[in-house]
Image (tube, grey):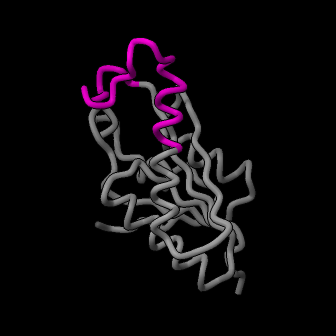
């Protein structure tokens, strides 16, 4: 039986995603796999809540990237584990597409994500989990909230 060596956990910082990241961390601990936690920053300005609008004197792209990196660091600090990699992608494509592409391009053998993470316009177009399930070339584990 093949054992997972590179696990990708995708997060949008929702409760479902937090649970999925914890499950991925536990799997990585059990199998000795390397864990990467990924956040895809999508650009849908009309779907951004008021509390997260970039200040006028800040470049919005860098503001949102820095904000996501800070949230990833907080997520990782709550996990028990060493050597967990993080990455943030800014994309004009869907999170589902980017997660699948990232897994393929970075030799991941398993993608772990929460099942109920979609918000706003994404919930109308179909969930990120569904998109990843249909486009991934590796195993996908969806974690229910």
- Residue placed at 30% from the left, 59% from the top? 15
Question: Image quadrant of residue 4?
Answer: bottom right
In the image, taking residue 8 as reference, residue 115 lies left or right, namely left
Image quarter of the N terminus: bottom right
Q: Is residue 88 above or below residue 103?
A: above
Q: Is residue 22 above or below residue 58?
A: below
> Which secondary structure type mostly characterizes the magenta part of the structure?
helix
Residue 23 at what x, y percent from top left?
Answer: 46, 73
Residue 30 at what x, y percent from top left?
Answer: 60, 85
Relative depth, front residue between 113 and 97: 113
Relative depth, front residue between 78 and 104: 78
Q: Is residue 60 above or below residue 39?
A: above
Q: As drawn, which residue projects farthest toward the front?
A: 57
Q: Which residues are magenta?
A: 44-69
Residue 60 at what x, y percent from top left?
Answer: 47, 20
Confirm whether the magenta stretch covers residue 110.
Answer: no
């Amino acid at each position: 039986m093949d054992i997972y060596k590179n696990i990708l956990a995708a997060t949008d910082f929702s409760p479902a995603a937090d649970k999925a990241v914890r499950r991925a961390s536990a799997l990585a601990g059990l199998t000795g796999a390397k864990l990467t936690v990924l956040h895809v920053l999508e650009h849908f300005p009309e779907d951004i809540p008021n509390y997260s609008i970039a200040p006028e004197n800040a470049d919005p792209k860098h503001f949102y990237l820095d904000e996501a990196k800070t949230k990833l660091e907080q997520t990782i600090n709550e996990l028990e584990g060493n050597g967990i990699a993080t990455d943030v992608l800014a994309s004009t494509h869907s999170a589902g597409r980017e997660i699948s592409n990232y897994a393929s391009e970075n030799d991941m053998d398993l993608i772990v994500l929460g099942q109920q993470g979609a918000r706003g316009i994404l919930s109308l177009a179909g969930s990120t989990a569904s998109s990843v399930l249909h486009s991934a070339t590796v195993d996908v584990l969806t974690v229910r909230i």
